[in-house]
Structure formats: C-alpha cells, structure tokens
Image (spheres, rainbow, N blue to C red):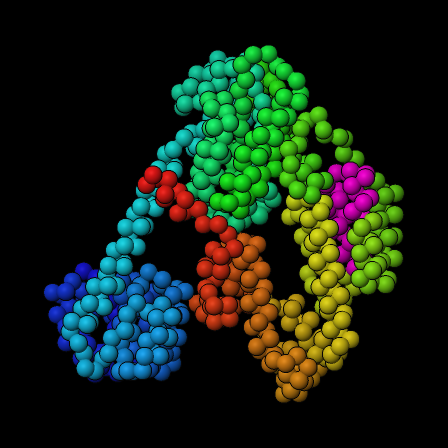
Amino acid sequence: MKRIILVDDEPIARQHVRESFPWTDWGYEIVGEAGNGAEALELCGGLKPDMALIDITMPVMDGLTLLDHMAASFPDTKCIILTAHRDFSYAQRAVQKGAFGYILKSPIDLAETKAALERASMELEKERRWVVALDRERRLVESSRYPLRRHFFQQLLTSVLTQDQEIMQRSSGIGITLTADHFLMLVCQADPLPLFVAKYPENDQSLVEYSMLEIVRESLLPLLPGQFEILPAFFGRFVILITFNGPVTTRDHYRQVCRQIEKRLEEPLSNYLKLQLAIAASPPFSELHKLKAVYQKTARQMIYRFYYERPRIIHAEDCFPLQPLSREDAVWLNGLAAQTASDPNPKTLQRFLNKAKTFFLQMKQQPGDVTDWLTELKTIFVNDSHLPPWPDFREAGSLFDAILRLDGWFQRMLRIQSSKLSIRPEIARAMQYIHLHLQDELSLDTIAQEVELSPSHLGHLFKKEVGTSVIDYVLEQRIELAKRYLEEARFRNYELAEKVGFRHYSYFSTMFKKMTGMGPNEYRRSVKTSILPLAYEKEKG
C-alpha cells in the first residue's frame, strides 16, 4: 500500500477526495490530512508518506511554497497538485517546483486521477530500485579488494608484519604479488588533500575511493601489466608499489617510469573525479621488511609539495634541507609588512606579496613556520573590526596557494576601503557590519543601532546608496557566502544553513533555490564530480 496525505484548507474538499476514489482497490491509503502547508510539513516529518495531494490556494503556506519545502526536506515524497485552477500557468509553475502531476478538483476525472497516481508510483518504484542497486554497490565495495589491502598495509605500518616470509604469505592470501627482485614505491595523494577529504560525506568516501583506485588500476594495466600493486593508506592517499625483476638500473630509468605513470593517471583522474595527484617517489629497494620505513620516509617528502605551484613527482634525491624561519628573517619580513600596512594600495600590496613569495622560494623554510608567520600577519594588517575574516593558511596546499589567499584578502580589504570613499560612511559601516555578522541574527533595527541611525532613515539611505533594501542585501550576501561554502565543501547542509544565518534548513533551501535557480544539493553537485554513475556502470559492465 502506498501512503498518501491530503493537503487542503477546506474540510469538505478533503472529505470529497477521500470518499470519491476506491483508494484500497488502487493500492493506496490516506494516512493523514493537513489544512495548510505548514501543517503538511509537520505531518510529513512523522508519517513519511509516499505521496502528497496538495491544494494550491491555502492560508499560512500555499501549495506552491509547500512544494519548495517538500523538495528540500522530503524529496522522496511525490507531490501531485490538486486544484480548481484551470489556468495552465499554475500547472507549469507547479511542475517547475517539483510537482509530479496536476489534477483538477472539479470535476474530478477518475481515470485521470488514477493515471497520475500510477505515474507517481512508477517513479517511486524506479527510485527504490536505484537505491537497492546503490546499496548492493556499496556492499560490493565494502567486500572488495581494497579494504583487505588497506588492512594488510596497516599491519605493515603498525609492525604486525615484520618478516619477509610472513609478508609474502599474508599478501599472497589476498591476491597481492610481491615476488620481485626490487621495488619502487610511489606515495600518491589527492591534491590538495584537505579539500578532497572535505568534499565528500563520510558515507560516500568508500565509493569515491573505490572509483579512484579502479581508475588508477585500469589506467596502469596497459603500461605495467602484472608489475604493480595498489595499497590504500587512508582516504585520499594510496601507495603504488612497482615490482621489477633483474638488477637495479639507472636513476633516469626509474624517473622515466614515474613520468609515464604520472602521465597515464593525469587525464582520467581529472576527467572523472576532477582530481590531481601529488606523488612522492622512493629510491629502489629490495627487502620487503623495509616497506614501513620506506613508506614513512617517502611520505615525508610530501612536505616539499609546498614549494611547487602545481603537483609534481617529488623524488628523494631532489629533497633539500628545509630551514626554520629565523628570528632575524621574521623581523625583516614583519618590517616589510608594517611598511606596507601603513600605506595599503594595490601597488604596495602587490610589491609586498612578490617580495614575500620570492623570499620564501629562495630560502625554503619549514612550511609550518611560513604558515605560522602568515597567520600572525593579522596583527599587522587587521586594524579595523569591519575587515573580512583573516584567511586560514593552514589549509593552503602550497606557498602559491597561501599567497593567493592573502592576495584575496587584500583585494576584499581594498574593496571595503573603496566603498567607504564612494558611499556615505554610515552605509559603509552598515555593509561591513552585515559582512561580519552574516551568521548572526540580523534585522534592520540591530544594524541601525550599530550605525546610530533610525531604522527608517537607514532603510531610506541604504536603498538610495546601494540600490537594494537592507534585508534583501543581507539575503544576497548570505546566499553568496553559502555558494562559496558549497564550492569549498566546508560544511554539511544542515550545518551550512546556520553558518550563513538561517535558523531553518527548509527556509534556507527555498531561498537558495529562488535566488540561484537550483537547490543547495544540486548546486553542490554542479561544482563536484558525481562518482555514483561511474561505479554503477562498472557493475553493469
């Protein structure tokens, strides 16, 4: 039995619908009724109906607004509009907002109603089959080779396996071939790793990893048939262990192999997962019991990625000693920053960025010292509470990324300073206050109090200077901030709404779709690669 709720503000209309159709014979049951959209949302939270028959014209929340909320909060419930409106524009608007069908209340057509319900039922069954297929795919992934290989690799790293013979026995039991004269280890990780990890919810990570590792395996098979093994370390990092028979050859030979691997992986990973890899390569080695030590040493080479603009292969022999940032160098750099902060303009700021970048590229200090110094620059440049938040340089994947973040902050600072000059000071202060408090409760009264104007006078001046109302400006800025967070994959959806000042996710989702033309999930998918169809096609093929 499919479960249906009726949403109509007229009790007589609900009774008429309830009694006019052979619901049980058709395979449906009416499980609840609501008099407006708000009541319907509350009802859906408890009943989880399969379908909702919704009237358009209702008090409190009408049917078209309810469709927005249903799409955001209860996307699995199929909505069918039940209305007396004969104007086709209503049908178009309803379908655009996610309605699955459109039925006239008067006169009710029995065949038309049954057909609409059957179409919705077929779509429900199709989606449920897809969910079952995905669940089957997930179970396949969980029982596949990669979790076993990850466990084996963890046993190596935790010294559970230390002898060559036991390593050989355990590996052969799970299909890993380590019979070779010598090996080359490539430690590969998504670049930049923190953004890759944050991009995918935890329950999707096993499937993403499966897709990534399968792309790697299939791409390398023609190049190195039977000559490599893939060992996952953690989400976003894995090892390619290349096997060689015969004596160790020249350094150039191994570098050539590494370049071929890099070239083979670059295009498919970029096309399917929008992913780049940073790769650290070990020297050749022959004893299996050294796998742990080789991995640890090779993984430490990843720190040198900080000084390359783009991901590249980092060979052990190319790694140079990294120096700490000395007190004398820090004093000189701080003096340069203070001089720039005394007269911040595009020319002086760009000169400062160029000098800092050139200095660090020449001196090659410890990346942690560099990002600490950049973080402490806040005390020199942030002298106004209305300036934008200082960047988090710990998330920077490279020196170039860190400098780009600082440049972005400088550009936002200059825009704020410019706005102070081009519009009234009170309005500039109001805009700055809004930018800094988007997460907080913002009303015309609180903003007016901050800039010491009456609410009505602020509203009048703001509209005149900015071209939009205070409340609309706040909404626009919140949606822009939400888009940036979605692009950076920094928060889960339920966290995102609060981070940009919305108390209820359903309202946030409605406003987001109204202003961008798509819901938050759809927008997030538009800026990240969907891996589910790839995995699904693999199973079918």
Quadrant of image for the N terminus: bottom left
Q: How many dots with numbers?
A: 0
Q: Which residue is drawn at 38% across and 78% down?
A: 61
From where the camera sits, is residue 434 visible?
yes
> Above or below — where is 130 with respect to 179?
below
Residue 33, percent from left and from top = 26, 73
Quadrant of image for the C terminus: top left
> Above or below — where is 505 with respect to 57?
above
Q: Which residue is drawn at 56% across and 58% down?
A: 485
Asked where in the image residue 119 lies, by quadrant, the reply is: bottom left
Judged left or right of residue 194, residue 104 is left
From where the camera sits, is residue 296 visible?
no
Judged left or right of residue 244, residue 123 is left
Q: Which residue is drawn at 58% across and 60% down?
A: 484
Asked where in the image residue 190 lies, by quadrant, the reply is: top right
Residue 194, percent from left and from top = 58, 45
The kind of secondary structure the magenta stretch mainly shows is helix
Residue 239, percent from left and from top = 54, 30
State which region is magenta: 356-381
Judged left or right of residue 272, residue 61 is left
> Above or below — where is 389 with respect to 9?
above
Q: Which of 453 and 522 is in front in this view?
A: 522
Residue 358 colored in magenta in the image: yes
Residue 212, percent from left and from top = 48, 39
